[in-house]
Image: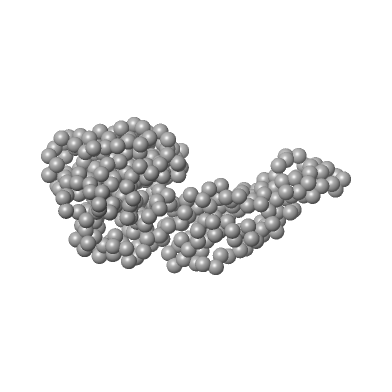
């Protein structure tokens, strides 16, 4: 679809597919590390405004609503991100050269999550002019997803209408991630008394923390999710407050990585840990919550109707920051994310656009 082409051509899926792939190639060519997404934000704005769509920018987030937005109707969020991690040192190709070869499009961010983003943009365009939708549709191309930053989707949601539910674009092979693990990082500190090791002075904080270390290794939470399995705790760092061989440490710290299933809130996990260990326990954040959407939700039922399976995802996304049900689903493969010579298959994008449209049409037709 060329710039300024008539709006009725938004219904031409082949043109939408071509435009989406062309846009992705441009986005790949522009570095867009987290907090440095201003140039890809500008490109997305140019793409949408050239199609006579009114766009709003909040920091490096870009958003737009369907043409016939009606405040009296419920709203759906279509969201994916345009920031990337820094390129893996193993790249043999230029990460910013969008090379198409043997049905693959190579480049940093092609799979995570550029293919999802441009597929959702194409889907938004397809429904943009519809006059009889049961829902409003709001598109958000968000920033800072890779670092779970405070100036990404969390910021822009404050300016948007309330959402009934969302569709989050992340590479899932177009299968439906209906649940997603939450992340909790704990600082656990034992306090003793410093002293000289030769004179057996002090109270060794390293020894004091050993029972807590063993508890983290052995404890099993009761609730096991059929989608996400058990809560998993891993002690990843242990350190004391001195570097001298002859000083008894007064403080010893553990860092604990906790991957939480959807059956627990982060506050519940913190309370259970504090109940069982003697050391002080401080969560770094309770933002990245485990989430789930019911298999009986109309969006999930529509996905099942078009032949899609559902699963629980071990990886986190902006879905964790959404205070409403959301489905994570998109073209590409999570296993390719953050790898050297990242790529996405062209036909994954083409099929992703078709599937997104089918999913929403089926749900709209059953409203």
- The quarter in which the N terminus is drawn is top left
The residue located at (63%, 52%) in the rendering is: 281
The residue located at (21%, 38%) in the rendering is: 53
Task: Kindly tell me whether residue 103 is visible in this rendering.
Answer: no
- Nearer-the-camera pick, 242 or 162: 162
Residue 63 on image: x %, y %: 30, 41
Task: Kindly tell me whether residue 269 is visible in this rendering.
Answer: yes
- The quarter in which the C terminus is drawn is bottom left
Q: Is residue 85 left or right of residue 234?
A: left
Quarter of the rendering containing residue 10: top left
Return the residue found at the far right. 199
Residue 122 on image: x %, y %: 23, 46
Position of 222 relative to 216 (above/below) = below
The residue located at (28%, 54%) in the rendering is: 74
- Nearer-the-camera pick, 7 or 65: 65
Quarter of the rendering containing residue 20: top left
Count of numbered tags: 0
Q: Is residue 252 left or right of residue 163?
A: right
Residue 283 on image: x %, y %: 57, 50
């Amino acid at each position: 679809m060329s710039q300024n082409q008539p709006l009725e051509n938004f219904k031409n899926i082949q043109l939408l597919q071509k435009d989406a792939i062309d846009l992705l190639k441009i986005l790949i060519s522009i570095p867009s590390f987290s907090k440095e997404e201003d140039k890809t934000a500008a490109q997305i704005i140019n793409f949408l405004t050239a199609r006579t769509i009114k766009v709003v920018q909040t920091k490096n987030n870009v958003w737009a609503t369907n043409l016939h937005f009606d405040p009296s109707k419920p709203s759906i969020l279509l969201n994916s991100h345009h920031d990337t991690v820094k390129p893996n040192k193993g790249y043999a190709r230029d990460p910013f050269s969008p090379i198409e070869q043997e049905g693959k499009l190579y480049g940093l961010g092609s799979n995570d999550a550029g293919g999802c983003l441009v597929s959702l943009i194409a889907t938004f365009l397809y429904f943009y002019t519809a006059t009889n939708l049961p829902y409003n549709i709001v598109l958000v191309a968000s920033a800072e997803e890779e670092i779970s930053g405070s100036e990404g989707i969390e910021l822009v949601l404050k300016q948007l209408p309330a959402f009934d539910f969302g569709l989050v674009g992340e590479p899932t092979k177009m299968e439906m991630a209906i649940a997603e693990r939450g992340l909790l990082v704990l600082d656990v500190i034992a306090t003793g008394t410093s002293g000289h090791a030769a004179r057996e002075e002090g109270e060794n904080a390293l020894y004091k923390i050993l029972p807590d270390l063993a508890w983290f290794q052995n404890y099993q939470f009761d609730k096991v999710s059929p989608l996400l399995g058990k809560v998993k705790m891993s002690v990843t760092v242990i350190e004391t407050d001195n570097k001298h061989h002859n000083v008894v440490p007064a403080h010893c710290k553990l860092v604990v990585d906790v991957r939480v299933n959807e059956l627990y809130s982060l506050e519940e996990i913190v309370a259970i840990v504090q109940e069982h260990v003697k050391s002080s326990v401080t969560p770094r954040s309770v933002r990245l919550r485990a989430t789930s959407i019911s298999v009986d939700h109309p969006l999930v039922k529509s996905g099942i109707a078009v032949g899609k399976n559902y699963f629980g995802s071990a990886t986190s996304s902006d879905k964790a920051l959404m205070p409403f049900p959301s489905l994570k689903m998109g073209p590409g493969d999570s296993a390719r994310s953050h790898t050297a010579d990242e790529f996405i298959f062209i036909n994954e994008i083409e099929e992703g656009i078709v599937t997104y449209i089918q999913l929403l049409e089926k749900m709209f037709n059953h409203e």
